[in-house]
Image (spheres, rainbow, N blue to C red):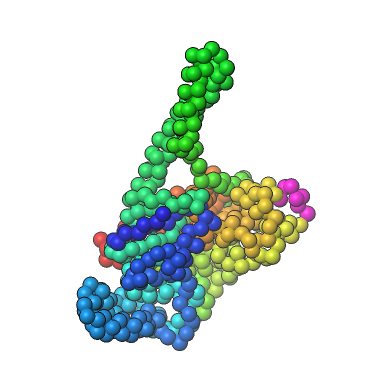
Amino acid sequence: MLELNYGRRYGLLGLNGCGKSTLLTAIGLRELPIPEHMDIYHLSSEIEASDMSALQAVISCDEERIKLEQEVERLVAQDDGGGEALERIYERLEALDVATAEKRAAEILHGLGFDKMMQEKMTRDFSGGWRMRIALARALFMNPTILLLDEPTNHLDLEACVWLEENLKNFNRILVVVSHSQDFLNGVCTNIIHMQNKKLTIYSGNYDQYVQTRSELEENQMKQYKWEQEQIANMKEYIARFGHGSAKLARQAQSKEKTLAKMERGGLTEKVSRDKVLVFRFTDVGKLPPPVLQFVEVSFGYTPENILYKNLEFGVDLDSRIALVGPNGAGKSTLLKLMTGDLVPLEGTVKRHNHLRIAQYHQHLAEKLDLEISALLYMLREYPGTEEEKMRSAIGRFGLSGKAQTMPMKNLSDGQRSRVIFAWLAYRQPHMLLLDEPTNHLDIETIDSLAEALNEWDGGMVLVSHDFRLINQVAHEIWVCENQAVTRWGGDIIAFKNHLKKKAGFE
């Protein structure tokens, strides 16, 4: 049973693979009864690559305007004049008004990180992540009655996340959003829909309120369950002992049997089924004497005209826990590649300890997996000479067990594939982990497990993430990458978020 109400913003939660995206698609395709006059926009893929500029691509909802104008003619021709429906269409046409459309579209694109020049660029000149942003801008521009967003923050940097959160806070129609960012769900949602064992439970309030309500309900349910089970055990024991005893005792035993049958008919309280939470574990690495990784007067640019960094001077050690923040394009991922040696500085040097092992997690690792083979076979090929049992337990440490280890990886969910990659990285026993957006295909519970594993591990870490909560859980220092420099932020990530809000004009 799913009921969506006007003016509500729903966060859809549930473990990886429980069917959240399938549900959004079903609503988007109107496989559920939805009144005809309600328009739905389901943001599921990036905008197509064409010669249209980013700005035009957002405004190009012209086919909708033509349809609406035809609808007006049809309604006016009717005897009753169309009443309410007409009013709705006029409102919609006003929203699509070309005169104001361009200004509105430009404001949305600007909020999502497109400067003037980028707004004029053709969509085919953008990467997939940026084309996804254009699609998101179009979804917001269309302002549909029902807006369905699946992980809208995945391709955004922290600044764009803050802008989107502030914007969706005021969305006054119906929003259903799947997101693994607790921070975002707290800022945006008026309700939470929890999906578990093919059942939907709706909670009122944002993410934090949901967590509190759910734990209170589960506690009460457990108390009720235990009480009932004790009653049942007592009655069963009584029936077994006295069912064949004297007439009086047998009568009482029969009446207890009736009570028992009635309880069972009325439906007994179910035992609380907890979401199975994964435990991640990275192997401790011991110490390497500092400096482990040192940048000495490093400058870098992909071309000499386009310098990203100038004269960087810093060190990273095994007790460093750093989050890199800054706008998209400032060079956060580039900095990680300079650390690993995938990129070489134009000037200066990057010194690495002779024994330093670095492992880097990034989006494109998933593309390297051979999906026709199983996770187990993949790992055995990557690390030849390892015993199968040893490898099974190494993969098991990241929550893939039994069948999931031996079936072709094309049958695994994105989240499960991410775990294969974590197992692959951890098997190298790195001293330092560089994590570039590690949360994109993980559910909230898995992100918390990852945070716990990182906090218990003794190596060094540099993190790039748009997930404020993960940063808050694991980072001890915030480094800001912008204007060709890397500077240390004085406060914590929450203070940085407030700074971004002010900068975007929301405070």
Q: Which residues are magenta?
A: 385-391
- 201 and 251: which is toward the camera: 251
Vertical comparison of 35 with 428: above or below: below
- Whole-percent x, y for residue 422 in the image: 60, 55
| Residue 291, visible in the rendered structure | no
Vertical comparison of 502 with 276: above or below: below
- 259 and 503: which is toward the camera: 259
Q: Please say whether residue 387 is one of the residues in the magenta stretch.
A: yes
Which residue is situated farthest in the top direction here?
A: 246
Which residue is situated farthest in the bottom direction here?
A: 51
Image quadrant occupied by the C terminus? bottom left
Q: Is residue 95 left or right of residue 207?
A: left
Q: Please say whether residue 202 is one of the residues in the magenta stretch.
A: no
The structure residue drawn at horizontal position 42% and vertical position 56%, both measured from the top left corner, is: 12
Q: Is residue 355 left or right of residue 33?
A: right
Examine the image and state in which quarter residue 10 appears: bottom left
- 473 and 214: which is toward the camera: 214
Which residue is situated farthest in the right direction here?
A: 385
The structure residue drawn at horizontal position 51% and vertical position 58%, both measured from the top left corner, is: 19
The structure residue drawn at horizontal position 53% and vertical position 46%, both measured from the top left corner, is: 277
| Residue 423, visible in the rendered structure | yes
- Whole-percent x, y for residue 271 in the image: 49, 37
Image quadrant occupied by the N terminus? bottom left
- Whole-percent x, y for residue 179 in the image: 43, 59
- Whole-percent x, y for residue 353 in the image: 62, 56
The structure residue drawn at horizontal position 77% and vertical position 50%, both measured from the top left corner, is: 387
Count of numbered labels shown in the rendering: 0
Which residue is situated farthest in the front direction here?
A: 247
- 244 and 455: which is toward the camera: 244
Q: Is residue 2 left or right of residue 359?
A: left
